[in-house]
Amino acid sequence: MPSAPNQDAADSFDTLRPTLVRVAYRMLGSVAEAEDAVQDAFLRWLDTDRSAVREPEAFLRRIVMRLCLDVLKAAARDLCRAMASGAGYPRRPGRQR
């Protein structure tokens, strides 16, 4: 059974979860990646001194946005590595050159 502080953190986070998923989805374009980013934000929220946070929604939005930027940077880095190795862009199915 979760402790009282963690339960309070979960309750406060759960009210903001739909908003945070929407923000992450708009940035990433994938529901699965958006949910992963929001879950990572929740884990960080549990480790945060919440008494020092004046605006939890703004704080959590910023965490989610930064996590999404990290995902996007990693994807761009992977694409650059693929291009450098000669793999190139993946072809779309059914499209010929």
Image (spheres, rainbow, N blue to C red):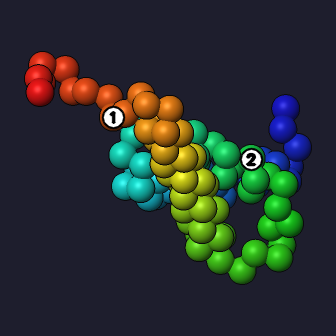
Secondary element at tag 1: loop
Q: Which mark is residue 89?
A: 1
Q: Residue at x 60, y 68 (%)?
A: 62
Q: Is residue 62 above or below residue 40?
A: below
Q: Residue at x 72, y 80 (%)?
A: 54
Q: Please, what is the three-letter code of the amino acid marked with disc 2? A: Leu
Choose between 39 and 55: the one closer to the eye: 39
Say if residue 75 shows up in the picture. no
| Viewport quadrant of the N terminus | top right
Q: Earlier in the sequence, mark 1 or mark 2?
A: 2
The spot of residue 97 in percent (x, y) is 11, 27
The spot of residue 22 in percent (x, y) is 41, 54
- Mark 2 Cα-neighbour bin, 10 Å: few <14, some 14–19, many ≥20: few
Q: CA distance from mark 1 to mark 2?
A: 35 Å
Judged by depth in the image, the label closer to the viewer, 1 or 2, is: 1
Say if residue 83 shows up in the picture. yes
Secondary element at tag 2: helix
In-image side of 95 versus 71 (left or right)? left
Q: Residue at x 83, y 76 (%)?
A: 52
Q: Which residue is mark 2?
A: 43
> Where on the picture, by quarter, is residue 93?
top left
In-image side of 42 versus 65 (left or right)? right
Do labels 1 and 2 touch, CB within 8 Å?
no
Farthest-out residue, top: 94
The spot of residue 4 in percent (x, y) is 86, 49
Q: Residue at x 88, y 43 (%)?
A: 3
Q: Is residue 44 above or below residue 31?
A: below
Choose between 75 and 88: the one closer to the eye: 88
Q: Please, what is the three-letter code of the amino acid marked with disc 1? A: Tyr
